[in-house]
Image (spheres, helix red, strand yellow):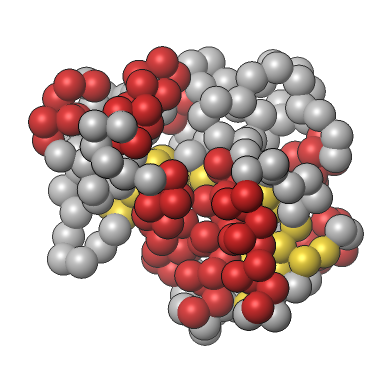
Amino acid sequence: MAAFRTLGPKAAAALDEELMSTGAFSIDQLMELAGLAVSQAMYTLSPPTKSPNILVACGPGNNGGDGLVAARHLYHLGYKPTMYYPKQGKNELYGRLRTQLEQLKIPFTNDFPAAVGKSNWIIDAVFGFSFSGEVREPFPAVIEALKTSVIPVLAVDAPSSWNIDEGPPQEGPGKWYDPAALISLTAPKPLAKWFEGRHFVGGRFVSQEVADKYGFDVPTYKGCDQIAEVGSHDEKL
């Protein structure tokens, strides 16, 4: 993997705070940009003509919100998303995002294994870079299913249950979980050192000045792309 500067947990949290204060971004805007990038990464991996059925697994936090936004964009790109969203967060934003999907008649399911069997790809938007501690119900079985499924997985910002600094866990349901693709939001996190699949960065809204302040690299985005693929041996951010 090409060398690049990553964004650690404290810096990532501080960056989000600055973006929403002096940067004047709202959480809605940041989530919309993230979800748009996720949907474009999915399209790059496999367009709807090839893989129409996408299962989007969402957690209760902002990572899950990114997944909800991504599903809306995927629908308008021609996919047929199905949502697994067993534990909705308390922020009213999540309720609004869910309502938008329900208005599009996008189905929600409580039977994750059955939905996996009907899917061409899975988007893992369960836990993001801020995850720590034990995986709580109902997500251990979900991560176990992601690990053992033959259906390819695109992880949002972090493979769920991975430690942001130390990568894949040494025990628990996430041990040996290795998704096919990863989209790092704003900048890659240190866990990317352990990731060997296709790797994208989405964050085409951060200035070079901000990137320099927080010590990460901005990739070269092409044309109107919201994502940049990174990670090949001859490629450098």
- Give the percent coordinates (x, y) of residue 53: 65, 74
- 68 relative to 218, above or below: below
Q: For the image shown, how many numbered marks are present on the structure?
A: 0
Compared to 150, does 6 lie above or below? Answer: above
- Which quarter of the image is occupied by the C terminus? top left
For image coordinates 52% across by 51% down, the residue present is 66
Which residue is located at x 43 percent, y 44 percent?
Answer: 27
State the image quarter where residue 81 is shown.
Answer: bottom right
> On the image, which quarter does residue 16 sit in?
top left
Does any portion of residue 177 appear in the rendered image?
yes
**Closer to the camera in the image, 134 or 99:** 99
Position in image of residue 101 (x %, y %):
63, 70
Instruction: In the rendered view, tell whether residue 103 sits above or below residue 148.
Output: below
Residue at (71% x, 26% y) in the render: 175
Answer yes or no: is residue 41 visible: no
**In the rendered image of this protein, does residue 72 appear above or below residue 23?**
below
Left/right of residue 181 with respect to residue 11 in the rendered view = right
